[in-house]
Image (tube, coloured by chain):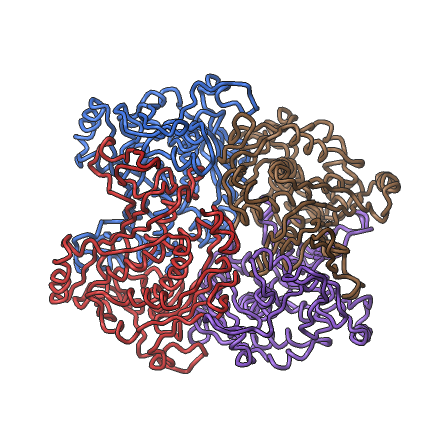
Chain colours: A blue, B red, C purple, D brown
Amino acid sequence: MEKFRFLTSGESHGKCLTAIIEGLPAGVIIDTDFINSELKRRQQGYGRGDRMKIESDTVEITSGVRFGKSLGSPVCLVIKNKDFENWQKIMSVAPEDYTDEKSFSVFRPGHADYPGAVKYGQKDLRNILERSSARKTAIEVAVGAVAQLFLKQLGITGSSEVTQIGSACCPEKFHEEIDMNKEKGDTVGGKFIVIYKNVPVGLGSHVHWDRGIDGRLAQAIMSIPAVKVVEIGTNPLGLCGSEYHDEFDIIDDKVCRKTNHAGGIEGGMTNGEDVIISGVMKPIPTMLKPLDSVDINTKQKAQAHYERSDVCAVESCAVVAQARTACILANEILLKYGADNMEELTQRFS
Amino acid sequence: MEKFRFLTSGESHGKCLTAIIEGLPAGVIIDTDFINSELKRRQQGYGRGDRMKIESDTVEITSGVRFGKSLGSPVCLVIKNKDFENWQKIMSVAPEDYTDEKSFSVFRPGHADYPGAVKYGQKDLRNILERSSARKTAIEVAVGAVAQLFLKQLGITGSSEVTQIGSACCPEKFHEEIDMNKEKGDTVGGKFIVIYKNVPVGLGSHVHWDRGIDGRLAQAIMSIPAVKVVEIGTNPLGLCGSEYHDEFDIIDDKVCRKTNHAGGIEGGMTNGEDVIISGVMKPIPTMLKPLDSVDINTKQKAQAHYERSDVCAVESCAVVAQARTACILANEILLKYGADNMEELTQRFS
Amino acid sequence: MEKFRFLTSGESHGKCLTAIIEGLPAGVIIDTDFINSELKRRQQGYGRGDRMKIESDTVEITSGVRFGKSLGSPVCLVIKNKDFENWQKIMSVAPEDYTDEKSFSVFRPGHADYPGAVKYGQKDLRNILERSSARKTAIEVAVGAVAQLFLKQLGITGSSEVTQIGSACCPEKFHEEIDMNKEKGDTVGGKFIVIYKNVPVGLGSHVHWDRGIDGRLAQAIMSIPAVKVVEIGTNPLGLCGSEYHDEFDIIDDKVCRKTNHAGGIEGGMTNGEDVIISGVMKPIPTMLKPLDSVDINTKQKAQAHYERSDVCAVESCAVVAQARTACILANEILLKYGADNMEELTQRFS
Amino acid sequence: MEKFRFLTSGESHGKCLTAIIEGLPAGVIIDTDFINSELKRRQQGYGRGDRMKIESDTVEITSGVRFGKSLGSPVCLVIKNKDFENWQKIMSVAPEDYTDEKSFSVFRPGHADYPGAVKYGQKDLRNILERSSARKTAIEVAVGAVAQLFLKQLGITGSSEVTQIGSACCPEKFHEEIDMNKEKGDTVGGKFIVIYKNVPVGLGSHVHWDRGIDGRLAQAIMSIPAVKVVEIGTNPLGLCGSEYHDEFDIIDDKVCRKTNHAGGIEGGMTNGEDVIISGVMKPIPTMLKPLDSVDINTKQKAQAHYERSDVCAVESCAVVAQARTACILANEILLKYGADNMEELTQRFS
């Protein structure tokens, strides 16, 4: 039941990340600068390690767009991995007579290593890590940026921000919390919020469980690497019914609400208020402090491998969540309004 | 990408609720008593109103099962609404010359009434309420019970319980919290947990966002009426990496973990530990205390309509969540192991 | 990518056939008489056997419709099997201590018996036959009738007829051909055509293979039991390009065509001309003449079991094809125009 | 219900064609030479025009494969358009101040031009043609070649050939028929056949219409550009039941058939015999002989634009059909056998 469909591909140290979006209407103005600015936002954030400097991702569009507008045909997005030349042998597509010195065999707790190796029958854990890495979220941000361009043309705008780092709920303390964990060789997670404004009434549906937009948003956020909690609107724990529910009002002859605890969603549908969704990201599993683990080959106890140097990536995660939310909203708008081109859609929308 | 597909139908006061499950392998032992016992669990719970007494749901299976075993063909489940005879005119399928005295037109905050009426172009809010009602979760529990029978045959068992009511985290205080809100004419929500044991390693996948089992579980739980928060495993907020991640151990030559903060899911895949998922249910939106609202016809301010008398339904919600989780797990097992009949599946599974 | 989704269930001699349709907009006028008249059309036809007299199918709607109009919620359709009481023991859902005298074990060539028994691990071929029987097309005709009611409200109308029986291409010879085969104890197939008028331009798409409406129609027709050939428009074999392609004209300032060899579909999209699709049905595989076969238990040669007495069912097949085509068109209209209620849809459509 | 999912993108004169395949198990041996040889087969064939010489397509794999084997992660395939540098301005992705001299506005009968322009709201028909062009089948052949590599590893092999050109059914006459049409400035279609050997019993299902493998194959073949007829096995028109149905036999203790009119499919499932599917391709719509048409801008009568010089492409079409069939079979095998890696799958398969 997807109209805005996409597939992504790409290994963390492979040649490039690619996405194909199928279902974008014709006539969406494709502003490459905006896509690149979202890619940049994803790479920033206090607590990120060194690779971010290497990356400086930019997108190339290889199909589906002509003279700055989408054609209605599939849109292909490519982000090159800039340090690929150093990895060409290790990540060779061709069958090679090569001994991979970067091969590793000790499962890292909190990563896909263990279930991935069992599922896909791999002995070299790099064969799992390369795809399970959060690197793949770069291309998802690009896809989400295209969805955001579509939404913007309809007046719908998104934003996101970090609301908690570790136990610090106040922005001034965020860097401090990160620094403290860095010093300990540890990592830290946190909470973020995504808000979309001017979302029309009636996206999603109450008529069947799998059409609720709340569930779809929850899937989109929970499946971001390292997210373990999703909340829509205000966490209702501890509030009674008369405190939690958003009473109606009429202002200037328009129906509105006195509060928005529901985060813009009632009965699995958007209700015209801002759509608000939060997520909690766990601490990054790769840390300087060693964790107890097991070697897949020897089946003996071992210490988990250390690969990357981020201490905190909640800021990036918020950008990814904003992107994913855009994809869900775009899909729901296309399901509700149909439309193969933006002229038609704009008419129906107003 | 569903192999265990199902559709449900039925209005709250219509003739019956129906579900068709497509994709169940042949040879699943269908124990109707178990399905009915799950239906009963859903109807119980301190804080439920009077309708629960009328209901006493039982399932009828009208296809897909012969001599106590599934055939591989679609399974049809029916739950009759026992008070339908009193609603026959109000809920008539045929075009009728009938004035519905139970028609209502004031939006209830927290319900699907407002977005549903806008989306489906309805003036009589009963046309929304009848389907948005949580009554439909009864047939979902029956579907989930069939999924649980399938899982049990593979040794996978589920359970669920309430972990918080309002601000009470301790079971002895739950009834007190409910009574207090009942006296105030208010309602109260809470938190529940679902646990599945003996889940194999490698359900879901890290290779594409929409294949992560974490996202699929989050969708299944978040789309339950009134659920606003979903958590997998331990909420990581405030824990640093070295505290949160589940170190490996080897006991009796088997790989295991020292903790299970991840709730049995790493990299979007099950890792062999118990699958643990929690949800927070908002307070029921229909309460004795009036809420400010608007009348859809007059477009004037009005007080929201009062229909039902539950004060708290978190226990029921936990049962629904257990059912939904079973459906997701059953689907993932069928995707991973294929198999059209239980003999084949049992072989592959072991 | 389905908006008009449905699942069906039911065994040939089970209690009933059921369908749930999810995705029908609110406000579709549900004329039960029309559904029943389509069911009747399916049961008629020269060459059908005795069961047709027992059946006289009628539909009951148990949800999704109120006061004669769809609500937007799932619509449940039920057709009772009128001779079920004679089959209650043989088709018992409960585990029974019953020896099925109607059990059979010799594969019938041309039926699902052999691959079905292998796939689902069954020894009693009734466990395959009961679902593979064309009996299930009755409920599909009911689903298609609902789709036709939806289409009619938009001015789109369908029809179907038989164009060939055996080697007879001329209607006056059809009965003769059937009688001749009946006398021989043989069966005969034939060809049928389905036509839909007033279909809007632009259903389907050229942008991705699985969005072409030609492919979707072909799937819908080819998967009807016993259909082996599907044609869209005129079979182009032997026509050169200048003969086959439909030149444009302008009449009364409207773009039109001089011919419609393409059957209303170019580039995977409807082009505004009548949608025309034909199918060839193979002869019914159950016949009085014995066919060489094998017994699943003894693994010895045996003669195939004789169960039913139809000689020719091409007329019925045409009705099923008309129904299936309606489902595809309804789905494509909902994908293109969106719309949750008929008022909105009618506006967008005009 | 797809496990072998893929999306393709790319305009006929754009930078490149791309495909992402999601769902391929780990451990498939990726032989790039085989993919390139299939691409070459697609480009050959008597009757193809000049572009074929420019093209000489070769694939580049940019993800999902390491050291010659699939990783289980999405596989990205790219085919560069070798004459892109001549089209860079005309096909610019960036908004350009460029007057497209290759813009055209007269609908070509038989092409997607008219319905595409209406659907996507385009005035420059190049915006439709670029994607509706059969050029996109090159990347589909690459995807199908990957599916074929997967099938081969399980012992399943495919082939295809042309069986009729125009009215010539005998291979020695094919070139003659093509030459004759070329001289007239006309085009000619024909018929092709695809055969897959060693397909296991039980792919597809009889239990629900959309699971029948016959329907899925029909969709895959009918949605190839220019295909208008699909046949499975022998066309049954004119054969009576006793002639058509494939009687069983036992040879060397193995169940087999005396004939294979059913084309290896009974009851929507493969039955262990060769899978045989044919298609009829219409004559290519672009021809030297002018066809009557209409100009989208002037709304006046005009002559259709001439773009390409193929006279006959049935040989290429057969290669595409073989590729598409491989994708359907691969998907069905993954649905039936599950399996995330080839080791596991090979075990289950035997």
Q: Please say if A30 is above or below C223.
A: above
Residue drawn at 40 percent across, 40 percent down:
A148
Which residue is more in the foreground, D75 or B111? D75
Q: Please say if A318 is above or below D275.
A: above
Pick out the residue farthest to the top.
A86
Residue B121: quadrant of the picture: bottom left
Query: Which x, y percent locates residue C22?
Result: 47, 62
**Whether residue C268 can be seen here:** yes
Residue B206: quadrant of the picture: top left
Query: Which x, y percent locates residue B279?
Result: 27, 51
Q: Please say if D88 is above or below D7.
A: above
Query: Which x, y percent locates residue A92?
Result: 52, 22
Which residue is more in the foreground, C348 or B143? B143
Q: Is residue B151 left or right of residue C39?
A: left
Query: Which x, y percent locates residue B151?
Result: 40, 55
Q: Is residue B207 left or right of residue B112?
A: right
Which residue is more in the foreground, A30 or D53? D53
- How many marks on residues? 0
